Every structure is written in C-alpha cells, then in structure tokens.
Image (cartoon, rainbow, N blue to C red):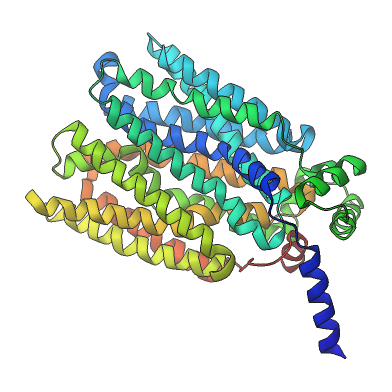
Amino acid sequence: MSSQEDIRRMSMTEANQPKKDWRFILIAIVAGLGGLLFGYDTGVVAGVLLFVNQVFHFDASMKGLFVAIALAAAAVGAAFAGALADAFGRRAVLIVAAVLFSAGAILSSVAGTIPILFLGRVMVGAAIGVSSMITPLYLSEITAAHWRGAIVTINQFYITVGIFVSYLVDYMLSGTPDGWRWMLGLGSVPGLILLGGMMVLPESPRWLAGRNFIEKATAGLRFLRGRQDVSEELGDLHRDIVEDSRRAAPWSLLLTRKVRKPLIIGVGLAVFQQITGINVVIYFAPTIFRDAGLSSASGSILATVGIGAVNVIMTGVAMRLLDTAGRRKMLLLGLYGMLISLVFIGTGFLIQLHGPLTYIIVGMVAIFVAFFAIGLGPIFWLMISEIFPLAIRGRAMSIATVANWVSNMVISGIFLDLLLIIGRGPTFMFYAAMTVLAILFTLWIVPETKGKTLEQIEDSL
C-alpha cells in the first residue's frame, strides 16, 4: 500500500513539473544578464590596468585603488540591495542597476580626470553589487526545485561569459589608441540589454505573494510554469508566508538560532570565495603572466583569453552536474583542485621558472580557474539563494554578498603591494593555506541542498 502511494505521488509530481518552454528559458537568460555585467567589468579591468597608467600615471597603490574603489561601491550596493529588493521587488531593483551600470560605464570611458574616472567606477561598482545579489535571488524564486541548480548557475555562467568577452575586447583593443576607454565604455551594452529585457519580465511570484498580491503571483506562476494549475505551488508559498507572518521580521531575526547556521554558511563561503585568490587571478592575470615571463602586453592578454575560455567551459560543465552530483560534492572537488594548482603556482614562482617552463604557471592558473568554476564559483551564489528563510532572505543574502565584496576589495586592493612585500611565491602559498581552511569549513558545516524545495531546505536548517 505504501509503495502504491509513493508511485501515485511520484506520478503527480511529474505531472506537475513545469514545462521547459521558450518563455522560461527567455526569463532565465535575460535575468542572467545581471551576471554578465558583473563578469564584464570584473574581467575588463585586467586589460585596462596595463594602459590606464599611461594617461593617469598610476603606481601600484593607485592601480590597487582603481580596482578596490569599484569593489567598495559594490559592497555598499549589495548592503542596500536586499532591503530594496524586499521593499520594491526584485525586478524594479534590477532595472535601476542596469541604468546605473550603463551610465557609469560611459562616464568612466570619457573621463579626463581621476575624480571623474573614479566616479564612473563607483557607479559601475554599485550596480554590480546590487545585481550580484538580486540576480541569483530572482532566479531562485522563479525556478522549480529540480531545475534550480542549473538555472541559478546561469548567473555564474554569464559572469564567466562576461569575463571571457572582456578579455577578448581587451586583446582586440590592446593596440588601439585610447583603447582602454573603449574597453570601459563597451560595458554599457550588456547594461542596456538587461534594461530592455527586464522591462518585459514578470516580478518574482514569491515576492508578490509575500506582499499579498495573490492574483499577480498566480498569473506569474502560470506564465513561468506554462500551465493553469499552480495551486499546489501557490499553496506551499502561502503556507510559508503565513508561518513567517506570525512573527515580525526585524534585523534581529538574523541573530536567531534558526538563521544563525545559514548565515555562518553564507558568510563563510562568501569570504572563502575571495581569500582563495580567484579575483586576484581574474583582475591581474595579464600582470601575473607578465611577471612569470610573458613579456608583451598583448601576449599576456592573449594567455588571459585562454583562461577566460576555460572559465566559461567549466562553468557550463558545472551547470550540467550541480543538480545530479550535488552541491557539496562539487564544492569539495573544486576546492581540492584549487589547492593543488595553487601549490604548483606558488612553487613555480619560488623556484623562478623561466623560458618554456613559464607555461607551467599559465597551465596551473588555468587548472585553478577550472576547479573554481565547477565548485566555489557557482556554488556560493547558488547556496545563498537557497538556505535563508523567506522572511529575511533578501537581507541575509545582502550580508553574505557584502562579505563577498568586502573580501574581494581587501584581497584585490592589497595584491600588488603584497607581491612587493613578500613576493609572488609566498603570496600564492597564502591563498593555498586559505583553501585548506575552506575545505575544513565545507566538511564541518556546509549541507547538501540538491533536489530540495526552498521550504524543505529551510526546515532542515
């Protein structure tokens, strides 16, 4: 009798699974453009740094500040993004972020003075901070449980595509007078595409239901799932919202026992994603390759294009595996691979490889990026969109995203000075040591969320 009941429930579940039609795919693609903004600006800085000092005469500290000021703005943007998304909706905030990013990209590209250049970078950084938090939140809330890993990872895939495209742009414009201005200005294109796309997309049904816009939430679910009967999913939403509405949701709720463990997981993964060195590689790859022995700027950027291609390909692999292999297993696999490659990179600099052996370092950087792309890269953004209770999801994701951007700012801002103080080899050995801590953290506390609804994850934590 029990087995017959299980079969009946499985049949009902399969019947109620959303149909993957063009509308749903379109929504995921357009919403993922928030990741493209993030990726393009992250990557384009690598090429800009090689040329911008010819106009503004930046030393190592000013180069670090040029990177860090956008990251500081991103941290501030992420800090306010959650509250804004909870108050005004995910869609409206993404529209504002698209406008801000496009305006900032254009302003920084035409800057004739350092203050104007930095103002443009602040605008771009704030937009990236907002979109980096809201995009995975929006995608997680419109997606059924059995697709969530792949769909939310579209955001990370777009980040890697943005990085790859920016590297190509850097290479093609590396010999052009004032090419760095075009590098920065072309960032307005994905911003404008995102703006146009979000104008026609629906608001998150979860947010609408939470604001008691039940008819709009129902219409949104029908559009997303491609069917008229969404009563079961709407019922789950309603029960979750009723439970959360029985208590107030002040900021102090973030300190309660129910939220403490998810918050530790989210902030921990946020910090480890940065202090293991990924954005040092992304921002400064041409500089690293030039230090390793690739003498020309164009040659260093071309090697960086290859790194960008690896990043895209392996993120695509991650999208296929996250909903089958599981989040935790993929995270650990990625961290082990990152650790091994970082040890090889640090050793290569310590023994001062030269000549053809320089390409060992290039290859190890590619392997490092590959393992990041199947593990810590997508899984951090996926996890923070899954593990927090609905009542404070936006604010909790803001905290994790702020921790991510602050860590990014600190690590990227001091990287060039760190190279001068302790050297290249010890710097990468430091990142290897941080990766060991990330492995221990994952083994200790990070759960498996594969195949669970957001409500089931909330209950289990």
Relative height, residue 232 to residue 359 (above, below): below
Can you say which quadrant of the picture contains the N terminus?
bottom right
In the figure, is residue 417 to the left or right of 78?
A: left
Q: Where is residue 365 in the image (x, y as percent from the top left)?
A: 28, 52
Evaluate whether residue 212 shows in this view.
Answer: no
Relative height, residue 173 to residue 277 (above, below): above
Q: Position of residue 309 (x, y in %)?
A: 35, 47
Evaluate whether residue 386 shows in this view.
Answer: yes
In the figure, is residue 170 to the left or right of 332?
A: left
Considering every residue shown, the one lying at the far bottom of the view is 1
Q: Where is residue 68 in the image (x, y as percent from the top left)?
A: 42, 31
Residue 280 picture quarter:
top left
In the figure, is residue 140 to the left or right of 279?
A: right
Please report the residue visible at 86 percent of the width from the left and 55 percent of the height from the top. 230
Considering every residue shown, the one lying at the far front of the view is 22
Can you say which quadrant of the picture contains the C terminus?
bottom right
Considering every residue shown, the one lying at the far left of the view is 355
Please report the residue visible at 32 percent of the width from the left and 47 percent of the height from the top. 307
Residue 3 picture quarter:
bottom right
Please report the residue visible at 70 percent of the width from the left and 54 percent of the height from the top. 388
Q: Where is residue 87 in the image (x, y as percent from the top left)?
A: 79, 34
Asked whether 224 or 235 is in front, the reply is 224
